[in-house]
Image (cartoon, grey):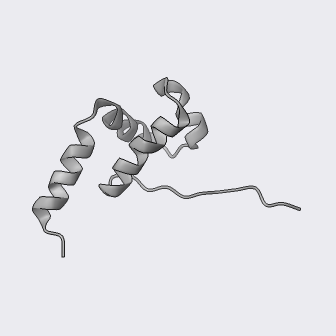
Amino acid sequence: MPNCRDELDTVLRALADPTRRAVVGRLAKSPAVVSEFAAPFSMTLPSLMRHLRVLEKAGLVTSEKQGVSAR
């Protein structure tokens, strides 16, 4: 069972990065599609996805995959 200190350390490490803080600030305003979301941060989609995974592991953001169904 994880303890509160470990969880707090994970959150603080995630927020230590200025890009991740900016991502959280942006997502606090409204949900976003990742492909549109990467452009203002001037980074590649894989780089942004790494930041989002860190934030998800810390429990600060959630994501869901949505696709277009084939006909």
In the rendered image, the vertical position of residue 69 relative to residue 61, given as above or below: below
Given residues 46 and 4, the one toward you in this image is: 46
36 sits left or right of 41 in the view: right
At x 55%, y 27%, the residue is 39
Measured from the top left, where is residue 27 in percent x and y?
A: 43, 42
In the rendered image, the vertical position of residue 4 relative to residue 29, given as above or below: below
In the rendered image, the vertical position of residue 2 relative to residue 68, given as above or below: below
Quadrant containing the C terminus in the rendered view: bottom right
Quadrant in which residue 65 is drawn: bottom right
Measured from the top left, where is residue 25 in percent x and y?
A: 36, 37
Given residues 53 and 23, the one toward you in this image is: 53
Count of number-bearing discs: 0
Quadrant containing the N terminus in the rendered view: bottom left
At x 49%, y 55%, the residue is 63
**Outermost residue toward the bottom in this view:** 1
71 sits left or right of 44 in the view: right
At x 15%, y 60%, the residue is 6
Measured from the top left, where is residue 9 in percent x and y?
A: 15, 52
**Outermost residue toward the left in this view:** 5
**Outermost residue toward the right in this view:** 71
At x 50%, y 25%, the residue is 40
54 sits left or right of 3 in the view: right
Measured from the top left, where is residue 62 in percent x and y?
A: 43, 56
